[in-house]
Image (spheres, coloured by chain):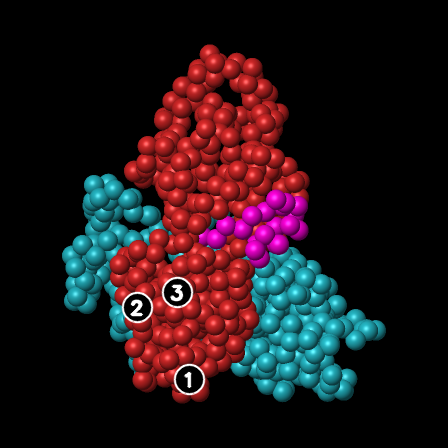
Amino acid sequence: MSKRIGIVLNNVPAYSETFFHNKISGLLARGFDVTLFAEKNGNEVPQGWKVVSPRSLPGSMWLRSVYLGAAIIKLLATTSKTVFRFYKLERAAGRSNRTAIENLYINAHILSCKLDWIHYGFATVALRREHVAKAISAKMAVSFRGYDVGIYALKHPGCYRLVWENVDKVHTISDDLLVKAYKLGLPTDIPIVKITPAINANDFIVKPAEQNDHTINILTIARLSWKKGIQYALQAVMELKDKGLQVRYTIIGDGEDKEKLLFAAYQLGLTDNVVFEGRVKSNQVPEYFKRHQIYLQPSVQEGFCNAVLEAQAGNMLCIVTDAEGLQENVLHNKTGWVVKRRDVKAMATTIADVAGMDNAIKEEIRRNARTRVQQEFTLEKQITAFEEFYND
Amino acid sequence: MTRKIAVYSGDIPSTTFIERLIQGLAEEGNTIYLFGKQKKDVNYPANVKVIAYSSNTSKLYLLAKYYLLLLLSRPKDLKQLKAICREKYNDRYFHALSTYIPVLYYRPDIFHIQWAKAIADWIWLKEFNKKIVVSLRGAHINYSPITIPGLADIYRKYFPLADGFHAVSNAIGYEAEKYGAHSIKTVYSGLNLENFPFKTKTGIAEGKIKILSIGRWHWKKGYDYAIDAMRLLSDQNFDFHYTIIGGAATEEAIFSRDDMGLNDKITFVGSVPHNELKEYMYDADIFLLPSVEEGIANVVLEAMAYGTIVITTDCGGMAEAVQDKKNGFIIPMRSSEAIAGKITEVAALDKEQLNTVAIAARKTIEDRFVSERMAGDMTKLYESVLER
């Protein structure tokens, strides 16, 4: 019988969230019985996907009690054993009666299913669901994202205690995130599997256009958010300009920091050097790869970064910071260059150095990067790794 | 004859400095009109008239009342305003009418727009020969026209039609001239010195240097540069503690502090009542303003009044209040190296040198940044506009 996998996310992933799309479609293609537990938020549900949504709790206390009561009676009628087991586990872990019952309600849609694995796509979605797997006699898996271990846990110390106590297997996208998770108390005896994001490299392979002038053309594809460290990149561009180099910096993406970054570019005197392209469709990205030589990922926080994989496939010379998984994504001096995050001088110097390198060296780095992405970060490999993850 | 001045920000009460202006202008003998939405109870002198709504119902009541009053007293004016609203605000006709009718009824001599972005909404007053004065403050002039598409064009179209401009600093006045602002008078914001008693420092503490910043978490405050600077100081084994009072800290701040290993060297404090703020100011060795955009930062003026040594970027009009090494210290914007460098420089000064700076800073405030002066200067601006 095919393995039954439940994947839990907050929302049905948008099409641009390639990681989950590839994973779910890939597992389905290999015969797994996959159920996605997530809110339907208007994102399109691909054909063949099975999606089960939770019921939200109403705001008013009175209605809340009625909803809770009704849901629990229904659950009791169908799977009373599961309900008791879940409730006992919650209570034994020190949760109040009320919290236990609320958690019962918010997990009702999962508790009534029969599964072999419950896989939480983020550590934060596992919160308040730590006992679901045990209650339905499934195994519990958790994936880490940069936000889970890098940001959320800082604001909520100790939040993963029950996750650590109950998880059977952990998936990480980078070694760096794992180091952070251990610092947060993840027990060292829990099996870990590293499965990096993957891309279809062929979609991005282009030949760089011949360059006739001395302009250094730099490209970044990132959400305009503080995590991406774009302000540091702008400062680096200013340093290059001050050194008398001709620089053109294209930034693809949109986000909450747009105002800040537009003003920074203006104030740093870069209006003629920096272009904010806004959002660009992913099938247009290779055109940008053709027109630029250097891809820069200036992030301060970054789980792994698909954009950098795509840039490597697209024959770009990649300069990235050492933020979290980026230094595993790009190997320093082999498939690109890694600089210290938040270090404007290092960024500027490396850009200038790379631009001035021999064509032979550039070609070698490009080839290494492309080949590594084509061999190591394939969708096939990723799905096979997940297959083993669940079959082991 | 007393002048009728509408001080318009849209909100009643408004920000601290606009409230201070209202009080000051009332004391100068002007009749002040406040239009807009009332958000809290207010207590003004008798010559401040509040014509405000607090809900949709009261807004409807205002519309009905002043519609009727205008219809009875000046039906021609009413007809003209309706025509203007119909032409300009087809889709928001009633909204516009209900906002404008009370203003037209009272016909203030000067309509003083506090937030420049609102200028397009009030330019119709020119058709009734009323004078428009526009305040040039912070973001509305310094970055909004750069980051909001089309706003620069609106400014270029309407600024030349206004009768006068109030700039919070010379610097912002120059910036606004790019969009056609003219007849600009700089009126600095003023403090009520009774609330800001000066205290002589016993000198920078031996050992740990206490650095303080106050201001909400917003990118324009440049806290990212300040936190990077603290890392540089920490790398040099410089002994310091940095406190930011700015409300709930952002994810970026919490992450950056941890990422750079500064958790025990930087404290984020939520909002603090005014009387406690004073204690933080007295306790700090250095007040730091790392901003990348300001009209002129009031909080720096306050630090100077209290006697706390100021390090500020030269953004906006800051250099009009602070002279490097005389009454404070100035650094270029967007440079964490400059922030760190200046902090070590100031920390190396002796007590006497610091006291000289602190006393000079207090004198600057007493001479040029007191509230009486603000209201008087503003009244002069109104007079010159009315004479023209």
Which chain letter goes with mark 3?
B
* Circle 2 Cα neighbour tier, 10 Å, few/some/many (<14 / 14–19 / ≥20): some
Q: Quadrant of the N terminus of chain B?
A: top left
Amino acid under label 2? Lys
Q: Are marks 1 and 2 in contact (CB under 8 Å)?
A: no
Tell me the distance, in whole angstroms, between the alpha carbons under discs 1 and 2: 21 Å
Residue underneath mark 1: B348
In front of the other: label 1 or label 3?
A: 3
The range drawn in magenta is B170-189
Q: Is residue A201 left or right of residue A103?
A: right
- Mark 3–mark 2 Cα distance, whole angstroms, equals 10 Å
Q: Which x, y percent locates residue A141?
A: 37, 70
For the residue carrying disc 1, how many other residues have a C-alpha within 10 Å: few (<14), some (14-19), or many (20+)?
A: few
The quarter of the rendered structure image containing the C terminus of chain B is top right
Of badges 1 and 2, nearer the viewer stands: 2
Amino acid type at mark 3: Arg
- Judging by the rendered image, the residue that carries numbered circle 3 is B362
